[in-house]
Image (cartoon, rainbow, N blue to C red):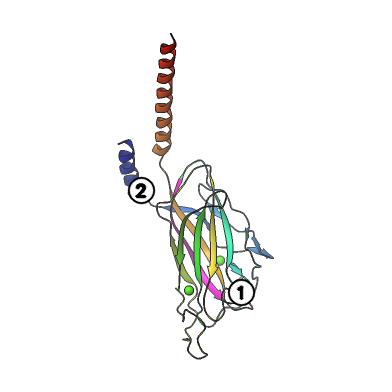
Amino acid sequence: MIITNFCAFFKGYNSANAATTILSTDFNGRTVSGATASGLNWTTNGVSDPGDLTADFNLFNTPATQDLFAVQRNIHTQGDWTVDITVAVGSQAIELDAITLDAYIFNNAGNTQSSSRDFDLTIDLLDSTKTSVLATDSVLDQFPIYDGPPPPPGLVPNVPNPAPLAFVFDFTGNILQGNTTYFLSLTASGQGLGNNAGIDNLVVTGTPVPEPLTMLGAGAALGFGAAFKRKLAQKKANKA
Ligand SMILES: [Ca+2]
Ligand SMILES: [Ca+2]
């Protein structure tokens, strides 16, 4: 019953409190060395500054890829690339809301693609040991393009590159516990004739979990303590 009442209270709290930005960066002014982007101007709220971001392949640092995060990896012909973002939660738990970013596509030289090419992105929420996927969401096939095995030349619609495209990932209802580290693992992939990809304006939103959660925990601990004391008293009484 306590749980039911608490959930009702919690739902009420959520509807009354809009999600806020807990983590964001626009990558402006970042520097690149190999696979690592440094000098990211993170905005944080209730989580630690994640610091540098390192992909599993080298980053572009061309004129077209300045002020964003783009990986020198052809996701169609060479395979996926991944980058993990550390989310170390402070003392207060956070209920995740959404992750949004702007998606870009590039050719092998790190120049803006003239035609639209496929760019899919998956975000996994990983636990502190990176062994469990706690939640996942993907944005697929948002760049308009023939999406499948390479067709004969001339059959691919030559749609202009629409970048940047806003990608929105739904992580509603996932609770990040206080004093716990998680990872947001981004994996880029794609199908078609060849394409590289990058992101900009990464924003993670969430709602701080209200204090009653902590109070409920304290109440449960108190209740457990009282029950333990009663048991101890009973044991003593039995002995006497
Ligand atoms: Ca930027
Ligand atoms: Ca696709």
Q: Amino acid at mark 1?
A: Gln
Q: Residue furthest bottom?
A: 154
Determine the CA span between mark 1 and mark 2: 43 Å
Comparing 45 with 8, the one in front is 8
**Badge 1 local density, few (<14 within 10 Å), some, or many (20+)?**
few
Q: Which contiguous range is marked in magenta?
A: 94-110
Q: Which residue is mark 1?
A: 78
Above or below residue 2? Residue 157 is: below
The question of residue 107 being in magenta is answered with yes
Q: Residue at x 57, y 73 (%)?
A: 75
Which type of secondary structure does the marked residue at label 2 adopt? helix
Q: Residue at x 52, y 46 (%)?
A: 89
Q: Point out which mark residue 14 bears.
A: 2
Picture coordinates of residue 226, whole percent (x, y): 41, 23
Picture coordinates of residue 166, whole percent (x, y): 46, 68
Instruction: Give left or right: position of 166 versus 193.
Output: left
Q: Residue at x 38, y 52 (%)?
A: 18
Q: Amino acid at mark 2?
A: Asn
